[in-house]
Image: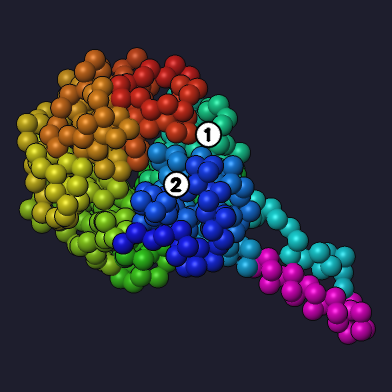
Amino acid sequence: MPYKVKEVANLVGVSIRTLHYYDEIGLLVPKSINQAGHRLYTDNELERLQQILFFREIGFSLKEIGPILDSPNFDRNRALELHRDVLLLQKKRLEDIIETINKTIQSTTGGIRLSTKDMFEGFDMTSIEKHKKKFTAGGYEHSIAIKADGTVWGWGNFGRTDQSVEKEPTLIKLLTNVKNVAAASGHYHSFAVKADGTVWGWGNNSHGQLGNGSDNSYEELPIQVEGLNQIMSVSAGVFHTLALKEDKTVWTWGPNWYGQLGDGTDKGRKTSEMVPGMTDVKEVSAGFFHSMARLEDGTVWRWGGFGDCTDMFPIRDESWVPVQVSQLDQVTAIAAGGMHSAALREDSTVWTWGYNTEGQLGDGKFEHGCSCEPRMVAGLSDVKAIAAGGAFTMALKKDGTVWTWGSNAFGQLGDGTNDRRSEAAEIPGLADVIQIAAGTKHSMAMTKDGSVWLWGSNDHGQLGDQTVSARNQPFKCMKVL
């Protein structure tokens, strides 16, 4: 039901004059105005007001708040997580200051001797300011690539606090002597495996997802994951990570709310441990909150759950231990999307399962539900590689063409439109492709001449074209290689 401005003021504890001012500057416009001239607000406006008050509580100006909330990529759940992180840091800072006051009182009465450092404990704002910079970035998209010389380069918001949408996207050299990389599924962190088998990570570490035994808020430079060696590949989800060792065992770390670490518990870890019972593993892949493994015998195993923790996409088919995906064998490749999964079989067909709201399963349907029963993508054959994004899927055929389906709000299907599609279709004009990759809302392809093509969301310059404008057709990025 609609609320009058006075009711909102009484409910929230702000003045009517403040609400009128928010309306005047376009920050909080009421849903409608009744015949009596009263401003009327619905639940949508109240949710926006809540966000405004959260931002105000951590020190943002009204001028800063508007563009963040109006961004087409604004993620309310992600913002709430960051609000919480900043407020927890502020809480700790206040506790430290109170403790400093107590110590100072004791020192003035002769109880203790206070060092110069102790006198100012709690006044450092560095951690809080670093967290607040995440809001100004307004998103979580990035791209990384390895050059032939083993160096890793990143562009877009790939886990550095000095990047924002106002700045031109910058190609930055991150590591050397690297053999493969794994970009996280959207929350500001990345990993790379060096030639010596060690794993290095950088970016957001608020949940211990970098595996270094701590939960420091941010790591600007790559740091080594503790206790891991002889690693062949890594795959990163929203907050958890999978690593495949040369002995074909799987090691995991990070939060474990839905069993995505596969150890039979829901307890998270800040350091890596082996997944019990997972041996002879050939490939691993991590989604938002689910994990996959392909074994030497061609079977596929999964653990964790499909979904994104929201009311719209609750976690489904949750398992705390690895379980075999039924009716699926002779698999040669796997790809975990945000809330769905894909597998490539020896006969070059593609099979999918999970959520299908955006048609990401490629079965000709848009269904609001989740199914762990694999189904074959119709009309698609001779496939040699697959990739899965947030809510879309890609396939590379043996003839060098790329086929896509699923969500297309940012042009990530590359077909020149922004219309979602539940059936696979070829990307026009893109040929001689040898490799593909999918981000949460953008796509990449490499052609045989070594050039890289990108399309989709570009709010953080992840397309490398020195703009923040999305593209619904592949763009040749000459800067990358």
Task: Say what amino acid the circle numbered 1 marks.
Answer: Val
Q: Residue at x 63, y 63 (%)?
A: 90
* Left or right placement of residue 232 versus residue 316 in this view: right
* Left or right placement of residue 453 versus residue 48 in this view: left
Work out whether mark 1 precedes mark 2 in sequence or the reverse, and give the earlier one.
Answer: 2
Q: Count the labels in the image.
A: 2
- Quadrant holding the N terminus: bottom left
Give the dominant element type of the magenta stretch: helix, strand or loop. helix
Residue 191 versus residue 154 in the image, above or below = below
The residue segment tinted magenta is 92-113
Residue 463: x %, y % from top left: 42, 27
Q: Nearer the viewer, residue 371 or 449?
A: 371
* Left or right placement of residue 371 versus residue 435 in this view: left
Residue 469 is a magenta residue = no
Residue 401: x %, y % from top left: 20, 21
Residue 407: x %, y % from top left: 24, 38
Residue 24: x %, y % from top left: 53, 43
Where residue 416 sits, quadrant-wise, is top left
Where residue 381 sits, quadrant-wise, is top left
Give the distance between the C-alpha atoms of the residues marked 1 and 2, in whole angstroms. 25 Å
Residue matched to label 1 = 165
Q: Residue at x 31, y 17 (%)?
A: 448
- Quadrant holding the C terminus: top left
- Secondary structure under tag 1 reads loop
Say the numbered circle drawn on residue 29. Answer: 2
Pointers 1 and 2 in contact (CB under 8 A)? no
